[in-house]
Amino acid sequence: MASTNSSASFYVTTPIYYVNDAPHIGHAYTTVAGDFLTRWHRQRGEKVWFLTGVDEHGTKVQRAADAGGVTPQDWVDRLVTADWLPVLETVNAKNDDFIRTTEERHIEAVQRFWEAVRENGYVYAAPYEGPYCVGCEEFKLPGDLVAGNGEFEGQQVCPVHGRPVEQLQEENWFFQLSAFADQLIAHYEANPQAVQPVSAYNEVMSFLRSGLVDISMSRSSVGWGIPLPWDEQQTVYVWFDALLNYITAIGYGQPADSEAGKRFAEIWPANVHLVGKDILRFHAVYWPAMLMAANLPLPGKVFAHGWLLVGGEKMSKTKLTGIAPSQIIDHFGSDAFRYYFLRAISFGNDGSFSWEDMSARYVAELANGLGNLASRGTAMVNRYCDGKLPAAGVATAAETALSDQLVAVVAEADAAMDELDFSTAIVAVKGFVDAVNMYVTEQEPWVLAKDEAQAERLHTVLYTICESLRAMSVLYYPLMPNTMAELWNDLGAVATLGSIDDQHIGDVAHWGQLPVGAPVTKGAGLFPRLEEVAE
Ligand code: MSP
């Protein structure tokens, strides 16, 4: 996944989320995944660009605003300010930009893009008649619908929303998607890593091989959208407005010598588009076809992750199953939230959230595992060595085993991050935490401390614990920025090694970085004991 030129940025995007309602943990999940990935790459010393944002046009948002009795613009302004921007702080995301599709920079560039595609000959006028799911904002194809259940028994429904679709009949403008089928197949045959995981790749290939039909790129019956520059009676179909955010946010269409134009040249194409599996077709078929039609380079990878499920179904506000991120974070903190979702669910698979599972992992892995190790290590340096990191004596096999394991753990975690296999990366670091905890149990530094003759051995053990904690804090910093910055500080590393932001993954395994005499403080406890969760 290395960038192809040295000035390029590692560019990662999340989908832009519909502002029909407030965010739930399904949305936060993708944002946290992107944040972990990009923080890891920053920690490698790479240039990074992380984009997220909101999708504000279309029928779904329009109807939500109507139901709320306000204009769509008021509705989105209110929700973005009250909920969507704050949730980034709640989950502690470090995004470089936030795009709103009602911004002028987006609207102008969308119009320019479609003008260019039309000039290239891929847009024509034609009538559309067929089913449309407002929940998906999608023209459905014959094979897309499934038999309904319960109140919709006997009807055809959308498989994602479980509701009947609407029948549309409109005079629209079409995008000539069919012109790109062969090129797309050839592209994915040559670049199998461009759609992941493999199940997603196979789904895209079979869709492509079944043949592509042209698709409406405008809507004549939707007022809340971007007007077509050549036909102001129509607005751009919301997906063909939204997908463009990935280029409009970084300067597409701006003069090559302007700031924005230079940024576009540096950042595009994206390295990774993170998406939920329900929007794979838009990202792995329609989006690259649009880019081909405009003669723009294609993204490196679309990764389709699974769903957070409630009662076996996709969590959604429409079904009233959405949990707000703050409901969990108020209780566990943002670091534990980030840890839990990326560690417990294999990225690419579906997963369920339960308070019991989250509490159990919090206690076992964070509080008792990492937190306890950190507080024991720093407390013993205070108790036995006046808070000054002692010098290590001669290393025995036990210490060498840990420093060797660290080399392997860094390599494994780094390789897993290249595959977007977050849980494997986390489990690798956790394996090191477990090994160091075992080392402490076996070495019994509290027993060594009782015997003057064992002073050197005690110092070796304490140094080894603190040096291991140094490595853990850097490796876990992209995942748990708050607590790991605290640990870094407790180790006296800020004063001696500088900011944790400047530590590189590639250097983590070099043993012996914490200098003797570093001022170690016993912190307040990284993962405090929890009050009972009130459900
Ligand atoms: N607006 C479109 C995306 C346009 S991107 C050019 C959209 N928005 S959405 O708000 O409905 O969902 C966007 C994303 O939120 C999903 O792709 C997924 O990343 C995330 N999730 C929403 N619900 C989710 C779950 N229940 N589980 C996991 N992720 C979920 O589609």
Image (tube, rainbow, N blue to C red):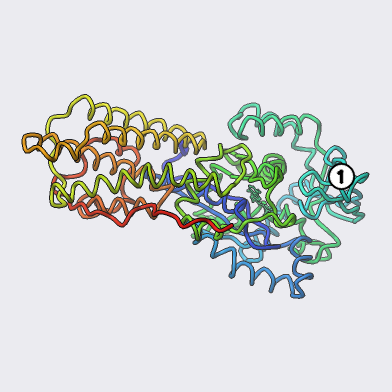
Examine the rendered structure and indicate whether residue 37 appears above or below residue 171.
above
Q: Quadrant of the C terminus?
A: bottom right
- Please give left or right for residue 293 compared with residue 148 in the image: left
Q: Residues within 10 Å of mark 1 (few under 14, many from 20)?
A: some
Residue 54 lies in what quarter of the image? Answer: bottom right
Q: Is residue 100 visible?
A: yes
Q: Residue 117: where, in percent of width, then height?
A: 73, 50
The reply to whether residue 9 is visible in this rendering is: no
**Which of the two residues, 229 or 100, is positioned nearer the viewer here?**
100
- Helix, strand or loop under label 1: loop
At x 29%, y 43%, the residue is: 469
Relative to residue 366, is residue 21 drawn left or right? right
Residue 78 vs 107, above or below: the answer is below
Horizontal side of 410 relative to 251 (left or right) equals left
Cβ of mark 1 under 8 Å from ligand 1: the answer is no
Relative image position of residue 257 (x, y in whole percent): 50, 57
State whether residue 535 is above or below residue 421. below
Which residue is rendered at x = 40% and y = 37% of the image?
Answer: 430
The residue that mark 1 highlights is 148
Residue 88, percent across and down? 52, 60
Q: Is residue 263 left or right of residue 294?
A: left
The one nearer the camera, 80 or 266, is 80
Residue at x 64%, y 71% (from the top left corner): 77
Work out which residue is located at the far top of the displayed protein and give it.
Answer: 397
Amino acid of disc 1: Gly
Q: Nearer the viewer, residue 254 or 57?
A: 57
Number of disc labels: 1
Image location (x, y in percent) of residue 110: 68, 58
Foreground residue, 46 or 359? 359
